Amino acid sequence: MYKVIFLGLISIFGVQTQYPTYDETYAKRIFNLAASAYPVYDPTANGTGPIDVCLSKSFPNVNWDAKQTHTVSCGMGWGPFLNSCQENENNECQMLVAVSTQSSTIVLAFRGTIGASQFLNELKSGYDMSIVFDGAPRVNSYFYKSMLKLWDSVIKDIVTNPGYSGYRIIITGHSLGGALASLTAYQIRYNVSNTSPDQIHLVTFGEPRTGDYIYANNLRNYINYIFRVVHGSDPIPHLPFCSSNSAGGCQSSNTNQYYQHAQEIWYHGASTDNYHMGTYDDSCSKTDGEDSSTLPGQSPSPTGYNGGVVHTHYFDVDISTFGANYCVYPS
């Protein structure tokens, strides 16, 4: 039954045989957008705030008709770390929405995890795949509920606006933001009838596992330009845990287990410290996000301080600090 559903969806959306090649320069431009999701947009800055500057570095000489930060209380509360209303800043999901009619582009960028309490909520939710998403996949409930709140509050109105029909939609995020980005891309392709596989550009950084095997494969088939950037032995892309197969990868036949989506772009990391990305390896399968036959698929998962530093640092900078500092690389 599992494979029948998947094959039926393939017949509807088609299977891609040609996939784009990873472009590091373009990925760094999108990284600026992911970093822009961390600060709050200030409309009184007259185009000189961090978000304004980061956007201009990614898209020089482009005018943006709309730039807004949207925040919702996300997921679910857990234990003593959150109050009953879940309104404290440590359980908020935030995103940047920007629209340019000049370049026919929509930007949807999602902020990553903020604070230990939100991280603990995400860990707890790793055991909950009770949500059956459109097209039959199971996905993480905390990620899904968070995405749906942002979808209902702002995203749906943007992506269904007839005036923006055919616009390129760049979707990105780091950490938790990466999961929200992938779910949003899936939601758009499945529910917005006038979108095409080439229209969405999905690039995430340090994205955790978000759904099961059906989800990972449907996402790959719905979107042509999709890359999941991983810094060295960042532990978050290996969470939540999956059921291992005999080859050391994740089982693809288990409907209640997580499975990562393709294509992983793995940066080796530097041997001298945890900050530098090193060079990238794009040999991972373009269709299987848990490809254990390559070195990236077998990358170790450190814990503790080192793992945290690796996770927060992409392209040699701490992403939240980078966004607040106008996307300026240190000299």
Image: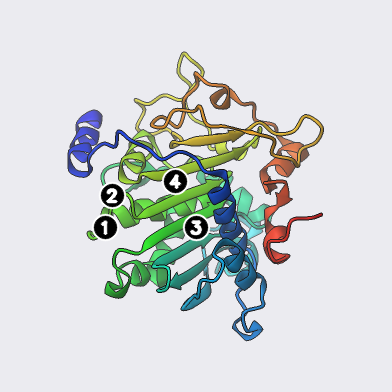
Q: How far, Cα to Cα, is label 1 from label 2?
A: 8 Å
Instruction: Indicate the quadrant containing the N terminus: top left, top right, bottom left or bottom right.
Output: top left
Looking at the picture, how far across and down is residue 244, in whole percent? 48, 22
Looking at the picture, how far across and down is residue 211, in whole percent? 41, 41
Disc 3 on helix, strand or loop? Answer: loop
Q: Quadrant of residue 43?
A: bottom right
If you read the primary sequence from the N terminus, does the residue marked by circle 4 or circle 1 appear first? 4
Q: Residue, x 56% and y 38% (percent of image)?
A: 237
Amino acid on which the number 4 mark rests in the picture: Asn
Amino acid on which the number 3 mark rests in the picture: Gly
Tags 4 and 3 touching, CB below 8 Å: no
Above or below for 295 versus 176:
above
Name the residue nearer the viewer: 227 or 214.
227
Name the residue nearer the viewer: 213 or 286.
286
Disc 2 on helix, strand or loop? Answer: loop
Q: How far, Cα to Cα, is label 4 from label 3?
A: 10 Å
Q: Residue, x 52% and y 75% (percent of image)?
A: 68
- Is residue 20 in sight in this rendering? yes
Looking at the picture, how far across and down is residue 85, in whole percent? 55, 69
Q: Is residue 58 left or right of residue 272?
A: left
Q: How far, Cα to Cα, is label 3 from label 2?
A: 19 Å
Above or below for 281 versus 119:
above
Tags 1 and 2 touching, CB below 8 Å: yes
Amino acid on which the number 2 mark rests in the picture: Asp
Q: Which residue is mark 1?
A: 191
If you read the primary sequence from the N terminus, does the residue marked by circle 3 or circle 1 appear first? 3
Q: Which residue is mark 3?
A: 75
Name the residue nearer the viewer: 175 or 222.
222
Q: How far, Cα to Cα, is label 2 from label 4?
A: 13 Å
Q: Which residue is mark 4?
A: 140
If you read the primary sequence from the N terminus, does the residue marked by circle 2 or circle 4 appear first? 2
